[in-house]
Image (cartoon, helix red, strand yellow):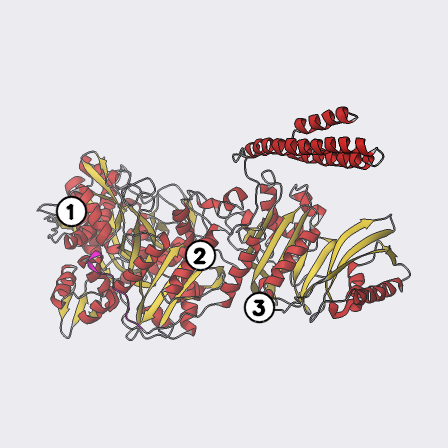
């Protein structure tokens, strides 16, 4: 009897619980109340104690029943609530660094040539006239010397200069090593030019050299095709056209099928289906002699490729000026 | 060089390839050729004749080449010269052999044509010249230009009346002499410039350009036609000195056969007779200092196959070479045609055979060679490693120009005597070789700040400076981070060095910079030297306010510059595993109040000395300023025993020892 008011209050509270957390709280409170009631029983007469005791037990059962029922309902409700989750919220920005596209291309090219048995060789960026010109069969009165030296080469004091091609590394290496030779040399080169979308004063080249007994044009074709296939990760067509470099004989222009249109013809390849990838040729006997290698015994090929150009082709970068721009909107894409 | 398709075609009687087809044949077997452009009834062919093939700097020469490529005969049209009987060339002009300097000219030919009527050229002549990029002037000048593009021999026409003393000399100019050329330019001459002169004064710059006074005008009636073979070296000397190149000088620079001069002269005289109604004086001046020697090259069909890597029979090789003008003489030697000065040895023949045979017919094959294992260059591996670590801790790699403007040198306070200047810079922006990577990197910061809240970039590249009169080139690593981030940057460097296996690195107070002093670059208060043992590897710290102000950068910037070559010397290739304890650890924090100017390192030393081997880690977890004089440093200490669980009692003992030691310093106080 004394319990009626209390009883209704407790049950109402449990029924009205809005969340599982609230329900647990109310249920604990209720259990406390019951404990209080039980403790009060001691003060009552035996008869009353029996009656009230029964009432308490009933209430206890009722509370538990209500609690369990409500728990089911709330659980279901809350699970349903959890079923919704917005995955379209934009992601948190996770910053990691990035490497320059030239580094990426250089690493890849180096790995491919290493797998073909070539050694990677480094050279210095400051050169002398002998290694940049004379030893490469470009003597001072040679018309090509004027084109390369006066017009395009940066001169420093004491006839030193900034190398205008990586071919100088060939000479440095051959002066110190005896054949057989298999090297590639990546590096920066410097040309005096007006900077525009296709011209830079500073860009990257890769020089290759293979000298052994009986190395031929046919061998060059095989090595180059293998490289192109591995680099562009697809079958690539390649063709050689006659060209002229003082340090190779025969000399070629190496064309590859246009990577943009796959040889169908587009703006990049001027509708020809071919793009120039670099120069090559059989090492000129005079160059071998300049390095004290007997051309009757040894022969081989040399090639030069623009690493910057390879990067432009691989990543479809339309303007050479991006590379030295330091623009993070460009660099962070790699 | 631009060629007229119709003029090329005129050498062939039979079927000739269409313009497009011809350009493809040329591209694949001789010279790159652009898409033919239709001009009236003709096509202009822009052919990139290779510099070692001056024999093709004319329609006649290119037609000779084409005839080999398409396997059809090229024929020179028939013509006949009619000389006057009464007037002799010697009656007009005197040219003495000793007056032709043999260091300038090996062959000097001339004819005199009189009764010439100078007027506009006929249309066909003007059309050919126009398509090849020449401006028609009058019939005499046009004929000399036409013969040059037709046969490859530059000619010059003088007005006879203007030649003083009726005498021609070929000599080096004297200092003080001057000439006004056809295009109204005055050139100062000297001993390095070869000229044609009359009795007194220069009348032309030999092989380059004619003088205005002696040039052909409407009044000219008697023409002296010069066809000479000037020495390459003389022409190069003049063109370099005058910085002047012409169509004629280009041809002499590359070399012209001695036999061409009299032939071209006669052909031009024939045209003058036909077109300008001139009469040709009998005979020609023909001064020859030296005869062309026949040159031989050894023919070895096996070597050619070996170079190309394809089997081509000896007879097929010979057939190709003979069609190119080579003649077989005894003992397997070939006589080289006089117009092919580029041919010297067997490799040159391999090229001729290869390209005419067709490079596309050579099948790729891998070389059968000695198996060698490529050596790996440590420097390359380390550079990659460094780049990868920096990338993984959030740095973006940049690559910048190796050249700096003068402003950079003064801004950073770099002593000018160590800086290397480019003699012929691209522009003033690129005048000096960079003695530091940081100028361009700070430019990068400025450029990117509007778009990014934080910038973390690095570069690996060469720096250049002068040391003991030598130019040194040194591989360098530099980078920056924006914001008040001294400790972060120190942390990044700490991680980098640890990952590179450098065990003995430490940061010292800034005293001086290794090698290149950049006086105004650093804020010396927040700046430290990076050392490994006693060796200075580089510097890191805050960029000075003045420098940032110059770049208009308004956030603090912290930078580092490290000598990569020194760094690589202290890197360790192999990592060694360091054993660690498996037993539970006990953690204690300690806060110490000390004067503001106390170095954290001083307290760390005390902690580490007292803690001994059981103190395995110390972290500074909090710094806060109590007042102007004092700060509080809180350290977290981790105690652990190698072989067993450490007892709390032991830790208490160690802590007591630490307290005692710290409080020995009257300025230090333990916060409890």
Give the structural element (helix, strand or loop) at label 2: helix
Question: Which residue is at the front of the view, B1 or B649?
Answer: B649
Q: Chain of mark 3?
A: B
Provide residue B170's location: percent of width, then percent of height.
32, 57
- B97 displayed left or right of B584: left
From mark 2 to mark 3, how far is it between C-alphas?
Answer: 27 Å
Residue at 70% from the left image edge and 47% from the top image edge: B484
Q: Which residues are magenta?
A: B360-369
Residue at 32% from the left image edge and 63% from the top image edge: A248
Indicate whether residue B295 is drawn in magenta. Answer: no
From mark 2 to mark 1, how far is it between C-alphas?
Answer: 62 Å
Question: Which residue is at the front of the view, A322 or B304?
Answer: A322
Q: Examine the rendering and report whether any part of residue B191 can be seen.
A: no
The residue pinned by badge 3 equals: B575
Give the structural element (helix, strand or loop) at label 3: loop
The residue pinned by badge 1 equals: B270
Q: Are marks 3 and 1 in contact (CB under 8 Å)?
A: no
Q: Label 2: few (<14), some or many (≥20) within 10 Å?
A: many
The residue pinned by badge 2 equals: A106
Question: Which residue is at the front of the view, A55 or B341?
Answer: A55
């Amino acid at each position: 009897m004394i319990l009626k008011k209390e009883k209704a209050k407790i049950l109402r509270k449990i029924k009205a619980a809005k969340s599982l957390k609230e329900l647990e709280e109310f249920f604990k409170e209720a259990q406390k109340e019951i404990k209080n009631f039980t403790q009060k029983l001691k003060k009552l007469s035996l008869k009353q104690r029996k009656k009230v005791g029964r009432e308490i037990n009933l209430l206890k059962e009722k509370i538990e029943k209500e609690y369990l029922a409500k728990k089911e309902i709330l659980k279901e409700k809350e699970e349903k609530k959890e079923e919704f989750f917005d995955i379209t919220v934009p992601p948190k920005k996770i910053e990691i660094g990035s490497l320059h596209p030239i580094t990426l291309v250089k690493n890849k090219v180096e790995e491919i040539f290493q797998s073909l048995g070539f050694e990677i060789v480094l050279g210095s960026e400051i050169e002398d006239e002998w290694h940049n010109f004379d030893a490469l069969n470009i003597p001072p009165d040679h018309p090509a010397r004027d084109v390369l030296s006066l017009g395009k080469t940066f001169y420093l004091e004491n006839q030193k200069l900034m190398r205008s091609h990586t071919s100088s590394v060939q000479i440095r290496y051959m002066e110190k090593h005896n054949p057989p030779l298999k090297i590639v040399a990546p590096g920066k080169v410097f040309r005096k030019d007006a900077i525009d979308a296709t011209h830079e004063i500073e860009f990257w080249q890769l020089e290759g050299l293979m000298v052994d007994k009986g190395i031929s044009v046919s061998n060059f074709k095989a090595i180059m095709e293998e490289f192109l296939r591995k680099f562009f990760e697809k079958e690539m067509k390649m063709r050689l056209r006659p060209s002229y470099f003082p340090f190779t004989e025969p000399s070629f222009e190496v064309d590859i099928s246009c990577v943009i249109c796959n040889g169908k013809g587009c703006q990049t390849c001027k509708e020809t289906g071919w793009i120039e990838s670099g120069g090559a040729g059989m090492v000129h006997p005079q160059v071998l002699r300049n390095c004290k290698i007997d051309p009757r015994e040894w022969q081989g090929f040399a090639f030069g490729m623009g690493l910057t150009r390879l990067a432009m082709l691989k990543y479809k970068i339309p303007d050479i000026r991006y590379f030295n721009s330091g623009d993070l909107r460009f660099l962070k894409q790699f | 060089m631009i060629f007229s398709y119709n003029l090329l075609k005129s050498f062939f009687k039979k079927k000739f390839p269409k313009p497009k087809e011809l350009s493809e044949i040329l591209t694949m077997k001789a010279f790159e050729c652009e898409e033919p452009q239709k001009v009236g009834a003709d096509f202009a062919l822009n052919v990139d004749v290779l510099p070692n093939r001056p024999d093709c700097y004319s329609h006649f020469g290119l037609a000779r080449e084409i005839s080999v490529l398409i396997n059809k005969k090229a024929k020179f049209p028939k013509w006949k010269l009619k000389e006057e009987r009464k007037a002799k060339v010697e009656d007009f002009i005197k040219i003495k052999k000793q007056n032709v300097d043999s260091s300038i000219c090996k062959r000097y030919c001339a004819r005199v044509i009189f009764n010439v009527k100078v007027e506009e050229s006929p249309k066909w002549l003007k059309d050919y010249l126009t398509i090849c990029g020449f401006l028609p002037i009058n019939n005499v000048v046009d004929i000399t230009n036409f013969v040059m593009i037709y046969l490859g021999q530059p000619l010059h026409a003088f007005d006879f009346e203007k030649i003083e003393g009726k005498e021609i000399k070929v000599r080096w100019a004297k200092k003080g002499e001057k000439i006004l050329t056809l295009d109204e330019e005055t050139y100062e001459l000297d001993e390095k410039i070869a000229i044609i002169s009359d009795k007194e004064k220069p009348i032309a710059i030999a092989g380059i350009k004619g003088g205005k006074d002696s040039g052909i005008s409407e009044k000219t009636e008697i023409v002296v036609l010069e066809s000479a073979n000037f020495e390459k070296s003389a022409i190069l000397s003049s063109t370099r000195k005058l910085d002047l190149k012409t169509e004629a000088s280009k041809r002499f620079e590359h070399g012209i056969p001695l036999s061409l001069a009299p032939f071209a002269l006669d052909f031009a005289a024939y045209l003058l007779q036909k077109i300008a109604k001139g009469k040709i004086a009998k005979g020609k001046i023909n001064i020859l200092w030296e005869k062309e020697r026949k040159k031989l090259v050894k023919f070895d069909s096996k070597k050619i196959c070996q170079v190309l890597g394809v089997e081509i029979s000896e007879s097929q090789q010979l057939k190709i070479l003979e069609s190119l003008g080579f003649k077989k003489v005894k003992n397997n030697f070939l006589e080289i045609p006089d117009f092919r000065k580029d041919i010297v040895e067997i490799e040159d023949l391999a090229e001729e055979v290869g390209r005419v045979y067709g490079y596309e017919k050579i099948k790729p094959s891998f070389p059968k060679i000695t198996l060698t294992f490529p050596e790996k260059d440590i420097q390359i591996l380390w550079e990659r490693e460094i780049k990868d670590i920096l990338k993984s801790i959030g740095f973006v790699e940049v690559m910048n120009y190796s050249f700096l403007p003068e402003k950079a040198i003064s801004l950073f306070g770099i002593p000018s005597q160590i800086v290397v200047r480019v003699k012929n810079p691209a522009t003033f922006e690129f005048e000096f070789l960079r003695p530091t990577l940081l100028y361009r990197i700070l430019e990068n910061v400025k450029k990117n700040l509007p778009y990014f809240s934080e910038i973390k970039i690095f570069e690996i590249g060469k720096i250049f400076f002068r040391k003991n009169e030598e130019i040194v080139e040194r591989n360098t690593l530099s980078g920056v981070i924006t914001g008040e981030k001294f400790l972060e940057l120190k942390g990044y460097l700490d991680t980098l060095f640890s990952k590179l296996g450098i065990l003995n690195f430490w940061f010292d107070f800034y005293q001086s910079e290794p090698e290149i002093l950049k006086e105004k670059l650093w804020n010396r208060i927040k700046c430290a030297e990076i050392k490994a043992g006693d060796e200075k590897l580089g510097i890191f710290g805050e960029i000075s306010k003045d420098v940032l102000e110059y770049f208009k950068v308004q956030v603090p910037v912290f930078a580092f510059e490290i000598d990569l070559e020194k760094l690589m010397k202290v890197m360790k290739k192999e990592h060694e595993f360091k054993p660690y304890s498996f037993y539970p650890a006990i953690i204690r924090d300690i806060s110490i109040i000390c004067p503001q100017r106390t170095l954290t390192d001083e307290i760390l030393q005390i902690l580490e000395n007292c803690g001994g081997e059981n103190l395995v880690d110390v972290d500074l977890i909090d710094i806060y300023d109590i007042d102007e004089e004092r700060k509080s440093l809180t350290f977290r200490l981790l105690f652990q025993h190698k072989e067993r669980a450490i007892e709390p009692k032991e830790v208490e003992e160690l802590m007591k020892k630490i307290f005692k030691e710290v409080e020995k310093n009257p300025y230090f106080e333990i916060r409890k």
